[in-house]
Amino acid sequence: MARPRVFDIDKAIEIATDLFWRNGYEQTSLANLTQAMGITPPSFYFAFQSKDNLFWRVIEHYQATYLGFMEEALRQPTARGVAEGVLYGSANTYSDALHPRGCLIVNCSLPCSDDAIEIRRELAKRGRVRQAKLRKRFRDAKSAGDLPPDSDPDELTRFILVVRWGMAMDSQAGASRKDLHRTVARAMQAWPR
């Protein structure tokens, strides 16, 4: 008869989220994870099968728990409202004192050895899906006359994403929420009128 699981999976995912967010994918070892969760490696493998499997569960948890503002932003009535919702939501998440600073996905994407290149590729692939949603929203806005005829939805999408990535890095370097909000306000001055 199998022994019952003696730890809370949801709590373990929260702990792993904090570790991956704080340290990145590569710098978070199995030893770090099992120690923080208070479990043995066999229990870890029984529950998660591998570090990679746990990581993808963490990414799903992160997106559902911390990036909900993205879907809300996409429902704003104007393209400008979408952009502001994405950027201010990002600034608020990246600077929240209740968790590590910056963006878990950016933190796990940047340092990448050959051992973790597949993680980076998969994160980029998932990022392109989110990027496509934003691009479609801006294209729809242009078709509806909410953006000027000479605006470029692809360029605007990249602009928003690059500002987000920059804020994630700036937050890790110590930028406050006020600093990030000032960055958003400055970026929005470049928005088409």
Image (tube, grey):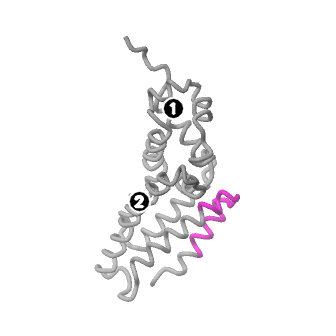
The quadrant in which the N terminus is found is top left
Residue 23 in the image: state x and y as whole percent: 63, 46
Residue carrying label 1: 11
Give, as a three-letter code, the residue at label 1. Answer: Lys
Q: Relative to 32, is 52 on the left or the right?
A: left
- In the structure shown, which secondary structural element does the residue marked by tag 2 occupy? helix
Q: Nearer the viewer, mark 1 or mark 2?
A: 2
Q: Report how far apart the C-alphas of labels 1 and 2 lie in the structure.
A: 28 Å
The residues colored magenta run 168-186
Give, as a three-letter code, the residue at label 2. Answer: Lys
- Identify the image quadrant of residue 46: top left
Tag of residue 180:
none
**Vertical position of residue 146 compared to residue 181: above or below:** below
- In the structure shown, which secondary structural element does the residue marked by tag 1 occupy? helix
The quadrant in which the C terminus is found is bottom left
Residue at the spot 44% in from the left edge and 33% down from the top edge: 49
Residue carrying label 2: 125
Residue at the spot 66% in from the left edge and 57% down from the top edge: 172
Task: Single out the residue that lies furthest toward the right.
Answer: 174
Residue 120 in the image: state x and y as whole percent: 50, 55
Q: Relative to 39, is 72 on the left or the right?
A: left
Residue 178 magenta: yes
